[in-house]
Amino acid sequence: MNVVVAGSGIAGLTAALHAQEAGHRVTLVTKGSLGDGCTRLAQGGVAGMYGERDSAAQHAEDTMAAGAGHADPAAVQALVADAGARIAELIARGVAFDRDEDGALQLGREAAHRHARIVHAGGDATGAAIATALVDAVRRTMITVIEQAFLLDLVVVDGAATGVRLLRRDALTELAADAVILATGGAGQLYAHTTNPHGATGDGIAAALRAGAAVADLEFVQFHPTILASGPPFLISEAVRGEGAALIDDHGRRFAFDSHPDGELAPRDVVSRAIARQAAIQGSPVRLDATGLGEAVLMRRFPTIDRVTRARGFDWSREPLPVTPAAHYLMGGVVTDLDGRTSLPGLFAVGEVARTGVHGANRLASNSLLEGAVFGARAAAALAPSTAHPPGPRRAATVAVEAAPPSSSSPTPPFSRAALQQLMWEAVGLLRSETGLVDALATLRSWSASTADPATIAEHEDANLLLLAHAAATAALIRTSSLGAHHRIDDTVPENAHARPLASILESV
Protein backbone atom coordinates (compact mmCIF):
# COMPACT_ATOMS: atom_id res chain seq x y z
CA MET A 1 0.00 0.00 0.00
CA ASN A 2 0.97 3.62 -0.50
CA VAL A 3 0.67 5.28 2.91
CA VAL A 4 0.98 8.99 3.67
CA VAL A 5 1.70 9.94 7.26
CA ALA A 6 1.11 13.61 8.12
CA GLY A 7 3.08 14.67 11.18
CA SER A 8 6.40 13.75 12.74
CA GLY A 9 5.93 13.56 16.50
CA ILE A 10 6.06 10.26 18.37
CA ALA A 11 2.75 9.07 16.89
CA GLY A 12 3.61 9.86 13.26
CA LEU A 13 7.18 8.59 13.46
CA THR A 14 6.05 5.36 15.14
CA ALA A 15 3.29 4.80 12.59
CA ALA A 16 5.65 5.48 9.69
CA LEU A 17 8.32 3.10 11.00
CA HIS A 18 5.85 0.30 11.67
CA ALA A 19 4.15 0.75 8.29
CA GLN A 20 7.49 0.69 6.47
CA GLU A 21 8.63 -2.37 8.40
CA ALA A 22 5.36 -4.10 7.40
CA GLY A 23 6.25 -3.62 3.74
CA HIS A 24 4.19 -0.54 2.88
CA ARG A 25 5.51 2.36 0.79
CA VAL A 26 5.51 5.29 3.21
CA THR A 27 5.73 9.01 2.62
CA LEU A 28 6.00 11.15 5.75
CA VAL A 29 5.08 14.83 5.40
CA THR A 30 5.67 17.36 8.13
CA LYS A 31 4.82 21.02 8.56
CA GLY A 32 8.29 22.01 9.73
CA SER A 33 11.42 19.94 10.02
CA LEU A 34 11.37 16.24 10.82
CA GLY A 35 10.82 15.80 14.54
CA ASP A 36 9.47 19.30 15.17
CA GLY A 37 6.39 19.70 17.32
CA CYS A 38 5.30 18.90 20.84
CA THR A 39 7.07 15.57 21.30
CA ARG A 40 10.51 17.15 21.29
CA LEU A 41 9.39 19.61 23.99
CA ALA A 42 7.92 17.02 26.36
CA GLN A 43 9.54 17.14 29.80
CA GLY A 44 7.36 14.42 31.25
CA GLY A 45 7.99 10.76 30.67
CA VAL A 46 6.27 7.63 29.44
CA ALA A 47 3.98 5.82 31.86
CA GLY A 48 3.72 2.07 31.82
CA MET A 49 6.60 0.39 33.70
CA TYR A 50 5.18 -1.36 36.72
CA GLY A 51 7.17 -2.03 39.86
CA GLU A 52 6.28 -3.91 43.01
CA ARG A 53 2.61 -3.68 44.02
CA ASP A 54 1.82 -1.94 40.70
CA SER A 55 0.14 -3.34 37.59
CA ALA A 56 -1.39 -2.48 34.24
CA ALA A 57 -4.80 -2.80 35.88
CA GLN A 58 -3.95 -0.10 38.42
CA HIS A 59 -2.59 2.14 35.64
CA ALA A 60 -5.92 1.67 33.85
CA GLU A 61 -7.82 2.55 37.01
CA ASP A 62 -5.80 5.73 37.49
CA THR A 63 -6.34 6.68 33.84
CA MET A 64 -10.10 6.20 34.13
CA ALA A 65 -10.27 8.12 37.40
CA ALA A 66 -8.25 11.06 36.03
CA GLY A 67 -10.50 11.11 32.97
CA ALA A 68 -13.52 11.66 35.24
CA GLY A 69 -15.07 8.40 34.05
CA HIS A 70 -15.37 9.72 30.49
CA ALA A 71 -12.57 7.57 29.04
CA ASP A 72 -13.29 4.52 26.90
CA PRO A 73 -12.42 1.39 28.95
CA ALA A 74 -11.45 -0.62 25.86
CA ALA A 75 -9.08 2.11 24.67
CA VAL A 76 -7.54 2.41 28.14
CA GLN A 77 -7.05 -1.34 28.26
CA ALA A 78 -5.32 -1.28 24.87
CA LEU A 79 -3.06 1.51 26.12
CA VAL A 80 -1.83 -0.22 29.26
CA ALA A 81 -1.65 -3.66 27.66
CA ASP A 82 0.82 -2.42 25.04
CA ALA A 83 2.80 -0.10 27.31
CA GLY A 84 5.66 -2.45 28.12
CA ALA A 85 6.18 -3.45 24.49
CA ARG A 86 6.23 0.13 23.27
CA ILE A 87 8.71 1.26 25.96
CA ALA A 88 10.91 -1.72 25.08
CA GLU A 89 10.69 -0.71 21.42
CA LEU A 90 11.79 2.84 22.23
CA ILE A 91 14.77 1.46 24.11
CA ALA A 92 15.62 -0.78 21.15
CA ARG A 93 15.45 2.23 18.84
CA GLY A 94 18.00 4.05 20.96
CA VAL A 95 16.13 5.98 23.67
CA ALA A 96 18.37 5.97 26.75
CA PHE A 97 15.89 6.13 29.61
CA ASP A 98 17.37 7.04 32.98
CA ARG A 99 18.57 4.15 35.11
CA ASP A 100 19.63 3.55 38.70
CA GLU A 101 23.18 2.61 39.65
CA ASP A 102 22.23 -1.08 39.36
CA GLY A 103 21.02 -0.55 35.79
CA ALA A 104 17.29 -0.72 36.53
CA LEU A 105 15.01 1.86 34.95
CA GLN A 106 14.30 4.78 37.25
CA LEU A 107 10.58 5.12 37.83
CA GLY A 108 9.04 8.50 38.62
CA ARG A 109 5.60 9.46 39.89
CA GLU A 110 3.37 12.28 38.71
CA ALA A 111 -0.02 13.64 39.69
CA ALA A 112 -2.96 11.21 39.90
CA HIS A 113 -0.66 8.15 39.59
CA ARG A 114 -0.80 6.03 42.71
CA HIS A 115 2.64 4.54 42.02
CA ALA A 116 5.96 5.50 40.45
CA ARG A 117 5.61 4.00 36.93
CA ILE A 118 7.01 6.67 34.60
CA VAL A 119 10.32 6.43 32.75
CA HIS A 120 12.26 9.57 31.82
CA ALA A 121 15.29 10.30 29.67
CA GLY A 122 17.82 13.00 30.51
CA GLY A 123 15.79 13.86 33.59
CA ASP A 124 13.33 16.27 32.03
CA ALA A 125 14.30 15.82 28.36
CA THR A 126 12.32 12.69 27.56
CA GLY A 127 10.60 14.09 24.49
CA ALA A 128 13.84 15.29 22.96
CA ALA A 129 15.45 11.89 23.46
CA ILE A 130 12.48 10.11 21.87
CA ALA A 131 12.28 12.50 18.92
CA THR A 132 15.99 12.20 18.23
CA ALA A 133 15.96 8.40 18.33
CA LEU A 134 12.86 8.04 16.14
CA VAL A 135 14.05 10.62 13.61
CA ASP A 136 17.35 8.80 13.34
CA ALA A 137 15.47 5.53 12.84
CA VAL A 138 13.36 7.06 10.05
CA ARG A 139 16.45 8.47 8.35
CA ARG A 140 17.89 4.95 8.18
CA THR A 141 14.88 3.60 6.25
CA MET A 142 13.46 3.99 2.76
CA ILE A 143 10.66 6.24 4.06
CA THR A 144 10.25 9.30 1.83
CA VAL A 145 10.32 12.45 3.96
CA ILE A 146 8.85 15.77 2.78
CA GLU A 147 9.57 18.66 5.14
CA GLN A 148 8.16 22.21 5.21
CA ALA A 149 4.89 20.84 3.80
CA PHE A 150 1.67 22.38 5.13
CA LEU A 151 -1.41 20.13 5.12
CA LEU A 152 -4.14 22.05 3.31
CA ASP A 153 -6.79 19.36 3.07
CA LEU A 154 -7.53 15.71 2.59
CA VAL A 155 -8.31 14.52 -0.92
CA VAL A 156 -11.66 12.71 -0.78
CA VAL A 157 -13.01 10.68 -3.71
CA ASP A 158 -16.26 8.71 -3.56
CA GLY A 159 -16.47 9.17 0.20
CA ALA A 160 -12.97 7.93 1.00
CA ALA A 161 -9.65 9.62 1.76
CA THR A 162 -7.35 9.08 -1.21
CA GLY A 163 -4.51 11.45 -0.43
CA VAL A 164 -3.49 14.84 0.87
CA ARG A 165 -3.25 18.33 -0.59
CA LEU A 166 -0.13 20.25 0.51
CA LEU A 167 1.22 23.78 0.30
CA ARG A 168 4.99 23.74 -0.06
CA ARG A 169 7.14 26.70 -1.07
CA ASP A 170 3.99 28.51 -2.28
CA ALA A 171 3.16 25.61 -4.60
CA LEU A 172 0.18 23.26 -4.34
CA THR A 173 0.96 19.54 -4.36
CA GLU A 174 -1.22 16.45 -4.15
CA LEU A 175 -0.03 13.07 -2.91
CA ALA A 176 -2.18 10.03 -3.68
CA ALA A 177 -2.45 7.32 -1.05
CA ASP A 178 -4.27 4.10 -0.26
CA ALA A 179 -4.35 5.25 3.36
CA VAL A 180 -3.66 8.52 5.16
CA ILE A 181 -2.54 8.60 8.79
CA LEU A 182 -3.07 11.97 10.49
CA ALA A 183 -0.54 12.65 13.26
CA THR A 184 -0.55 16.44 13.16
CA GLY A 185 -0.95 17.13 16.88
CA GLY A 186 -3.29 19.44 18.74
CA ALA A 187 -4.42 23.04 18.66
CA GLY A 188 -2.71 24.77 21.57
CA GLN A 189 -2.43 28.01 19.59
CA LEU A 190 -6.13 28.53 20.20
CA TYR A 191 -5.15 30.12 23.51
CA ALA A 192 -3.31 33.26 24.58
CA HIS A 193 -1.27 31.24 27.09
CA THR A 194 -0.01 27.86 25.91
CA THR A 195 2.89 25.47 26.22
CA ASN A 196 2.48 24.46 22.58
CA PRO A 197 4.80 25.53 19.76
CA HIS A 198 3.64 28.06 17.15
CA GLY A 199 2.80 25.30 14.67
CA ALA A 200 0.10 23.71 16.88
CA THR A 201 -2.82 25.17 14.93
CA GLY A 202 -5.09 22.14 14.62
CA ASP A 203 -4.48 21.64 10.90
CA GLY A 204 -5.25 17.91 10.87
CA ILE A 205 -8.46 18.16 12.90
CA ALA A 206 -9.66 21.04 10.72
CA ALA A 207 -8.90 19.09 7.54
CA ALA A 208 -10.77 16.07 8.91
CA LEU A 209 -13.75 18.25 9.81
CA ARG A 210 -13.90 19.71 6.31
CA ALA A 211 -13.68 16.21 4.86
CA GLY A 212 -16.65 15.05 6.94
CA ALA A 213 -14.87 12.87 9.51
CA ALA A 214 -16.41 12.63 12.97
CA VAL A 215 -14.83 14.59 15.79
CA ALA A 216 -15.68 14.66 19.48
CA ASP A 217 -14.71 15.99 22.91
CA LEU A 218 -13.23 19.28 21.68
CA GLU A 219 -14.55 20.94 24.84
CA PHE A 220 -11.97 19.05 26.89
CA VAL A 221 -8.75 21.09 26.88
CA GLN A 222 -6.16 20.38 29.53
CA PHE A 223 -4.41 23.34 31.12
CA HIS A 224 -1.04 22.49 32.62
CA PRO A 225 -0.94 23.91 36.15
CA THR A 226 2.66 25.07 36.36
CA ILE A 227 4.08 27.32 33.68
CA LEU A 228 6.83 29.74 34.72
CA ALA A 229 5.08 33.09 35.15
CA SER A 230 8.03 35.09 33.88
CA GLY A 231 9.03 35.52 30.26
CA PRO A 232 7.86 33.28 27.39
CA PRO A 233 5.82 30.22 28.43
CA PHE A 234 8.05 27.53 29.91
CA LEU A 235 6.64 24.39 31.47
CA ILE A 236 7.70 23.26 34.94
CA SER A 237 7.18 19.51 34.73
CA GLU A 238 4.60 17.82 36.91
CA ALA A 239 7.40 15.46 37.91
CA VAL A 240 8.75 18.30 40.09
CA ARG A 241 5.60 18.06 42.20
CA GLY A 242 5.86 14.29 42.02
CA GLU A 243 9.27 14.58 43.66
CA GLY A 244 7.82 16.66 46.50
CA ALA A 245 7.60 20.32 45.44
CA ALA A 246 4.67 22.23 46.95
CA LEU A 247 2.32 24.94 45.69
CA ILE A 248 2.14 27.84 48.13
CA ASP A 249 0.23 31.10 48.37
CA ASP A 250 1.76 34.48 49.27
CA HIS A 251 1.73 33.45 52.95
CA GLY A 252 3.54 30.16 52.29
CA ARG A 253 0.42 28.03 52.81
CA ARG A 254 -0.16 24.88 50.71
CA PHE A 255 -3.54 25.92 49.32
CA ALA A 256 -4.07 23.04 46.85
CA PHE A 257 -5.41 20.83 49.65
CA ASP A 258 -8.41 23.19 49.88
CA SER A 259 -9.58 21.77 46.53
CA HIS A 260 -8.59 18.11 46.71
CA PRO A 261 -7.22 15.70 49.35
CA ASP A 262 -4.28 14.89 47.05
CA GLY A 263 -3.19 18.54 47.01
CA GLU A 264 -0.51 19.20 44.40
CA LEU A 265 -0.89 15.66 43.04
CA ALA A 266 -4.59 15.95 42.25
CA PRO A 267 -5.67 15.70 38.58
CA ARG A 268 -4.40 18.57 36.45
CA ASP A 269 -7.78 20.23 35.93
CA VAL A 270 -8.34 20.47 39.68
CA VAL A 271 -4.86 21.86 40.35
CA SER A 272 -5.08 24.37 37.51
CA ARG A 273 -8.36 25.79 38.77
CA ALA A 274 -7.04 25.91 42.33
CA ILE A 275 -4.04 27.93 41.12
CA ALA A 276 -6.21 30.29 39.09
CA ARG A 277 -8.56 30.90 42.02
CA GLN A 278 -5.74 31.53 44.49
CA ALA A 279 -3.90 33.85 42.09
CA ALA A 280 -7.11 35.86 41.64
CA ILE A 281 -7.59 36.09 45.41
CA GLN A 282 -4.09 37.35 46.13
CA GLY A 283 -3.62 39.34 42.92
CA SER A 284 -0.29 37.72 42.09
CA PRO A 285 1.02 34.37 40.83
CA VAL A 286 1.19 31.46 43.23
CA ARG A 287 4.58 29.82 43.73
CA LEU A 288 6.04 26.37 43.36
CA ASP A 289 8.41 25.63 46.21
CA ALA A 290 11.04 23.03 45.28
CA THR A 291 13.69 24.30 47.69
CA GLY A 292 13.30 21.25 49.91
CA LEU A 293 14.65 19.00 47.15
CA GLY A 294 18.05 20.65 47.25
CA GLU A 295 20.32 22.03 44.54
CA ALA A 296 22.02 18.74 43.68
CA VAL A 297 18.74 16.87 43.13
CA LEU A 298 17.22 19.68 41.07
CA MET A 299 20.27 19.94 38.81
CA ARG A 300 20.50 16.18 38.30
CA ARG A 301 16.81 15.34 38.01
CA PHE A 302 15.65 18.44 36.10
CA PRO A 303 18.61 19.80 34.16
CA THR A 304 16.57 21.60 31.50
CA ILE A 305 14.32 23.34 34.01
CA ASP A 306 17.32 24.21 36.15
CA ARG A 307 19.13 25.77 33.21
CA VAL A 308 16.16 27.81 31.97
CA THR A 309 15.03 29.08 35.36
CA ARG A 310 18.56 30.19 36.24
CA ALA A 311 18.87 31.92 32.86
CA ARG A 312 15.71 33.85 33.75
CA GLY A 313 17.12 34.97 37.09
CA PHE A 314 15.70 32.36 39.47
CA ASP A 315 17.65 30.08 41.79
CA TRP A 316 14.86 27.59 42.45
CA SER A 317 17.00 25.73 44.96
CA ARG A 318 16.71 28.82 47.18
CA GLU A 319 13.45 30.53 46.16
CA PRO A 320 10.00 29.34 44.99
CA LEU A 321 9.10 29.90 41.34
CA PRO A 322 6.05 31.95 40.24
CA VAL A 323 3.76 29.71 38.20
CA THR A 324 0.48 29.95 36.29
CA PRO A 325 -1.67 27.57 34.19
CA ALA A 326 -1.55 27.47 30.38
CA ALA A 327 -3.27 25.46 27.64
CA HIS A 328 -1.39 22.22 27.19
CA TYR A 329 -3.25 19.29 25.63
CA LEU A 330 -6.44 18.60 23.67
CA MET A 331 -8.26 15.46 24.79
CA GLY A 332 -10.69 15.56 21.88
CA GLY A 333 -10.09 15.28 18.17
CA VAL A 334 -10.85 12.99 15.25
CA VAL A 335 -12.84 10.00 16.50
CA THR A 336 -11.08 6.66 16.00
CA ASP A 337 -11.49 3.02 16.86
CA LEU A 338 -8.83 1.06 18.73
CA ASP A 339 -6.72 0.82 15.57
CA GLY A 340 -6.83 4.48 14.57
CA ARG A 341 -9.56 4.12 11.93
CA THR A 342 -11.81 7.14 11.59
CA SER A 343 -15.36 7.40 10.24
CA LEU A 344 -13.89 8.40 6.84
CA PRO A 345 -12.71 5.32 4.91
CA GLY A 346 -8.98 5.38 4.22
CA LEU A 347 -8.26 7.87 7.01
CA PHE A 348 -6.51 7.04 10.28
CA ALA A 349 -5.63 9.38 13.15
CA VAL A 350 -3.08 8.89 15.93
CA GLY A 351 -1.65 11.00 18.73
CA GLU A 352 -3.12 14.29 19.91
CA VAL A 353 -5.04 14.83 16.67
CA ALA A 354 -7.12 11.74 17.54
CA ARG A 355 -9.84 11.15 20.07
CA THR A 356 -9.09 7.54 20.88
CA GLY A 357 -11.10 7.69 24.09
CA VAL A 358 -8.02 7.09 26.24
CA HIS A 359 -7.97 10.46 28.01
CA GLY A 360 -11.66 11.05 28.68
CA ALA A 361 -12.31 14.47 30.17
CA ASN A 362 -8.80 14.96 31.57
CA ARG A 363 -5.49 13.37 30.55
CA LEU A 364 -3.45 11.46 33.11
CA ALA A 365 0.13 12.73 33.20
CA SER A 366 2.64 10.92 30.95
CA ASN A 367 -0.04 9.04 29.04
CA SER A 368 0.31 11.17 25.89
CA LEU A 369 3.72 9.93 24.72
CA LEU A 370 2.54 6.42 25.52
CA GLU A 371 -0.66 6.93 23.52
CA GLY A 372 1.31 8.13 20.49
CA ALA A 373 3.56 5.07 20.58
CA VAL A 374 0.77 2.54 21.24
CA PHE A 375 -1.79 3.78 18.74
CA GLY A 376 0.79 4.72 16.11
CA ALA A 377 1.86 1.07 16.09
CA ARG A 378 -1.73 -0.20 16.16
CA ALA A 379 -2.75 1.97 13.20
CA ALA A 380 0.17 0.74 11.12
CA ALA A 381 -0.71 -2.86 11.95
CA ALA A 382 -4.30 -2.25 10.80
CA LEU A 383 -3.30 -1.03 7.33
CA ALA A 384 -4.94 -3.33 4.81
CA PRO A 385 -7.40 -3.20 1.91
CA SER A 386 -10.16 -3.44 4.51
CA THR A 387 -9.42 0.16 5.53
CA ALA A 388 -12.05 1.18 2.99
CA HIS A 389 -14.73 -0.15 5.37
CA PRO A 390 -13.97 1.25 8.84
CA PRO A 391 -16.27 0.88 11.81
CA GLY A 392 -18.34 3.86 12.82
CA PRO A 393 -17.34 6.17 15.69
CA ARG A 394 -17.97 4.93 19.20
CA ARG A 395 -19.44 8.27 20.22
CA ALA A 396 -21.35 10.97 18.44
CA ALA A 397 -19.36 13.65 16.67
CA THR A 398 -19.23 17.22 17.84
CA VAL A 399 -21.97 19.00 15.90
CA ALA A 400 -21.86 22.68 15.05
CA VAL A 401 -25.06 24.45 16.12
CA GLU A 402 -26.30 27.98 15.95
CA ALA A 403 -26.00 29.63 19.34
CA ALA A 404 -28.46 32.09 20.79
CA PRO A 405 -27.99 35.78 19.97
CA PRO A 406 -25.23 37.52 21.91
CA SER A 407 -26.18 38.80 25.35
CA SER A 408 -24.47 42.14 24.83
CA SER A 409 -24.32 44.67 22.03
CA SER A 410 -20.58 45.32 22.30
CA PRO A 411 -18.95 45.83 18.91
CA THR A 412 -16.97 42.89 17.58
CA PRO A 413 -13.22 43.58 17.61
CA PRO A 414 -11.38 43.12 14.31
CA PHE A 415 -10.00 39.63 13.74
CA SER A 416 -6.42 38.78 14.56
CA ARG A 417 -4.91 35.60 15.89
CA ALA A 418 -4.09 37.39 19.14
CA ALA A 419 -7.72 38.51 19.48
CA LEU A 420 -8.94 34.95 18.86
CA GLN A 421 -6.51 33.55 21.42
CA GLN A 422 -7.58 36.06 24.05
CA LEU A 423 -11.26 35.36 23.37
CA MET A 424 -10.71 31.62 23.79
CA TRP A 425 -8.65 32.15 26.96
CA GLU A 426 -11.36 34.26 28.55
CA ALA A 427 -14.51 32.44 27.37
CA VAL A 428 -13.47 28.86 26.56
CA GLY A 429 -10.61 28.51 29.02
CA LEU A 430 -10.36 27.25 32.58
CA LEU A 431 -13.75 28.69 33.61
CA ARG A 432 -16.77 28.84 31.27
CA SER A 433 -20.36 30.06 31.36
CA GLU A 434 -23.34 30.12 29.02
CA THR A 435 -23.19 33.90 28.64
CA GLY A 436 -19.49 33.89 27.84
CA LEU A 437 -19.79 31.02 25.38
CA VAL A 438 -22.76 32.54 23.56
CA ASP A 439 -20.96 35.86 23.18
CA ALA A 440 -17.80 34.10 22.05
CA LEU A 441 -19.70 32.18 19.37
CA ALA A 442 -21.26 35.38 18.08
CA THR A 443 -17.82 36.92 17.74
CA LEU A 444 -16.43 33.81 16.06
CA ARG A 445 -19.26 33.78 13.52
CA SER A 446 -18.67 37.43 12.75
CA TRP A 447 -14.96 36.81 12.22
CA SER A 448 -15.62 33.79 10.01
CA ALA A 449 -17.97 35.83 7.83
CA SER A 450 -15.56 38.75 7.49
CA THR A 451 -12.25 36.98 6.80
CA ALA A 452 -11.09 36.51 3.22
CA ASP A 453 -10.24 33.17 1.66
CA PRO A 454 -6.84 32.11 2.96
CA ALA A 455 -3.81 32.19 0.69
CA THR A 456 -0.69 32.10 2.84
CA ILE A 457 0.16 29.40 5.37
CA ALA A 458 -0.47 31.84 8.22
CA GLU A 459 -3.94 32.61 6.81
CA HIS A 460 -4.71 28.89 6.46
CA GLU A 461 -3.64 28.39 10.06
CA ASP A 462 -5.94 31.22 11.16
CA ALA A 463 -8.83 29.64 9.24
CA ASN A 464 -8.17 26.31 10.94
CA LEU A 465 -8.07 27.95 14.37
CA LEU A 466 -11.33 29.76 13.68
CA LEU A 467 -13.01 26.52 12.63
CA LEU A 468 -11.80 24.68 15.72
CA ALA A 469 -12.62 27.58 18.04
CA HIS A 470 -16.22 27.48 16.83
CA ALA A 471 -16.41 23.70 17.25
CA ALA A 472 -14.85 23.80 20.73
CA ALA A 473 -17.03 26.67 21.95
CA THR A 474 -20.13 24.94 20.58
CA ALA A 475 -19.25 21.70 22.34
CA ALA A 476 -18.62 23.62 25.57
CA LEU A 477 -22.00 25.34 25.26
CA ILE A 478 -23.81 22.06 24.66
CA ARG A 479 -22.22 20.40 27.70
CA THR A 480 -24.01 22.34 30.43
CA SER A 481 -22.52 20.40 33.34
CA SER A 482 -18.91 20.41 34.49
CA LEU A 483 -16.78 17.37 33.78
CA GLY A 484 -13.01 17.04 34.09
CA ALA A 485 -11.24 19.85 32.29
CA HIS A 486 -14.57 21.35 31.17
CA HIS A 487 -15.70 23.57 34.03
CA ARG A 488 -18.97 25.52 33.87
CA ILE A 489 -19.22 28.15 36.59
CA ASP A 490 -22.98 28.26 36.00
CA ASP A 491 -23.29 24.56 36.88
CA THR A 492 -24.88 24.33 40.32
CA VAL A 493 -23.66 20.78 40.96
CA PRO A 494 -20.39 20.48 42.97
CA GLU A 495 -17.16 20.16 41.01
CA ASN A 496 -16.79 16.82 39.19
CA ALA A 497 -19.92 15.42 40.83
CA HIS A 498 -20.97 14.45 37.30
CA ALA A 499 -18.05 12.04 37.05
CA ARG A 500 -18.79 8.36 37.59
CA PRO A 501 -17.91 7.02 41.07
CA LEU A 502 -14.61 5.16 41.18
CA ALA A 503 -16.33 1.86 42.02
CA SER A 504 -18.40 2.18 38.86
CA ILE A 505 -15.30 3.06 36.83
CA LEU A 506 -13.40 0.01 38.08
CA GLU A 507 -16.25 -2.33 37.08
CA SER A 508 -15.76 -1.34 33.43
CA VAL A 509 -11.97 -1.75 33.34
Image (cartoon, rainbow, N blue to C red):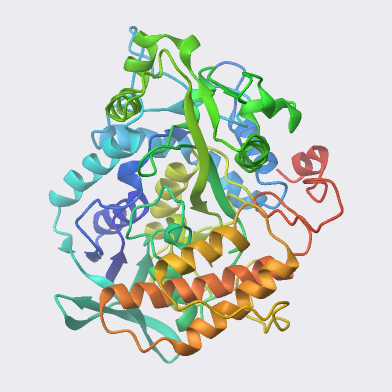
- Is residue 360 visible to us here? yes
Residue at point 22%, 41% (across, down):
132
Q: How many marks?
A: 0
Q: In which quarter of the image is the N terminus?
A: bottom left
Counting from the top left corner in percent of width and height, residue 116 is at: 53, 22
Q: Quadrant of the C terminus?
A: top right
Residue at point 21%, 70% (across, down):
149
Query: Which of these two is toward me, 127 or 19?
Result: 127
Counting from the top left corner in percent of width and height, residue 228 is at: 43, 35
Taking the image as shown, residue 136 lies to the left or right of residue 123, namely left
Query: Which of these two is toward me, 502 or 261?
Result: 261
Residue lying furthest right in this view? Answer: 492
Residue at point 61%, 72% (across, down):
440
Location of residue 281 by image quarter = top right
Location of residue 111 by image quarter = top right
Query: Which of these two is toward me, 403 or 311?
Result: 311
Vertical position of residue 329 compared to residue 98: above or below: below
Vertical position of residue 438 compared to residue 484: above or below: below
Vertical position of residue 477 compared to residue 256: above or below: below
Residue at point 40%, 58% (across, down):
185
- Is residue 262 visible to us here? no
Counting from the top left corner in percent of width and height, residue 23 is at: 24, 61
Taking the image as shown, residue 113 lies to the left or right of residue 407, namely left
Counting from the top left corner in percent of width and height, residue 154 is at: 36, 80
Taking the image as shown, residue 154 lies to the left or right of residue 274, namely left
Residue lying furthest bottom in this view? Answer: 158
Location of residue 409 by image quarter = bottom right
Vertical position of residue 33 compared to residue 334: above or below: above
